[in-house]
Image (cartoon, rainbow, N blue to C red):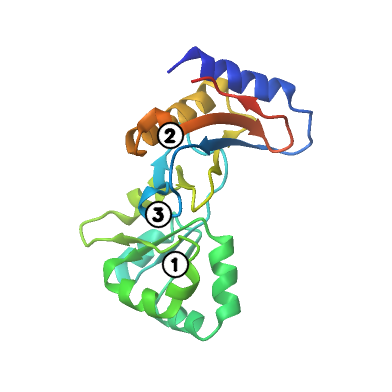
Amino acid sequence: MADTIVDAVSRALDEAPGRNFRETVDLAVNLRDLDLNDPSKRVDESIVLPSGTGQDTQIVVFATGETALRAEDVADEVLGPDELEDFGDDTDAAKDLADETDFFVAEAGLMQDIGRYLGTVLGPRGKMPTPLQPDDDVVETVNRMKNTVQLRSRDRRTFHTRVGADDMTPDEIAENIDVIVRRLEATLEKGPLNIDSVYVKTTMGPSVEVPE
């Protein structure tokens, strides 16, 4: 990991005005030389941050039986088939659920019903559940997703993602940024050439450019 990333994060934290609440640290990525009208060229990646997000991540699990019981220890909410069907009849409640939840996890056997009852709400928001296969450990899956962020550019050249909180160390935040930039360089059509610039900032603080 480059010292320049640590330096940029340190500046962003130092230059942020003092607040009486915990601030998020965000990364802004500006892309170039990409036709983002072509959905196949857009950024849509889930990344596990090695130092964690520094924030609470809301996770809802759709499950039954033993999986549902185990999920109750780690998920913010566990919903079964009956609740799922209820959301199909209440679009406003479905939208509230989608807006309040960062990630959804669902037993693979429930995915068809989720598509039927919630697909029109979750699909456009990019929040369709991660399918849980029979051999998957729901506790392990949910705990991993608590440290996950979604990179999604849609058709915009500039997009943002959370990389930490202002009470984390510069090294921890920089490690998260390094993982994100490396993933982008590996997945973009022209790699680093498609990244125009990267900035880091706290919620209320000034933007500081992260040198390449």
Q: Amino acid at mark 2?
A: Asn
Q: Nearer the viewer, residue 200 or 63?
A: 200
SS state under label 3: loop
Q: Earlier in the sequence, mark 1 or mark 2?
A: 1
Q: Amino acid at mark 1?
A: Gly
Q: Nearer the viewer, residue 153 or 180?
A: 153
Q: Residue at x 34, y 38 (%)?
A: 187
Instruction: Tell me residue 41's x, y (percent).
Output: 38, 48
Q: Earlier in the sequence, mark 2 or mark 3?
A: 3
Cα–Cα gap, marks 2 and 3 = 15 Å
Q: Residue furthest bottom?
A: 89
Instruction: Tell me residue 166's x, y (percent).
Output: 64, 31
In this rendering, would 177 be left or right of 18? left
- Of badges 1 and 2, the one in the foreground is 2
Can the viewer see residue 174 in this picture?
yes
Instruction: Tell me residue 100's x, y (percent).
Output: 58, 61
* Mark 2 lies on residue: 194
Q: Nearer the viewer, residue 2 or 85?
A: 2
The circle drawn on residue 123 is 1
* Mark 3 lies on residue: 38
Crowd class of label 1 (few under 14; some 14 to 19; many from 20; radius 10 Å): few
**Image position of 48 with respect to 110: above or below:** above
Q: Amino acid at mark 3?
A: Asp
SS state under label 1: loop
**Image position of 209 with respect to 88: above or below:** above
In this rendering, would 118 be left or right of 157? left
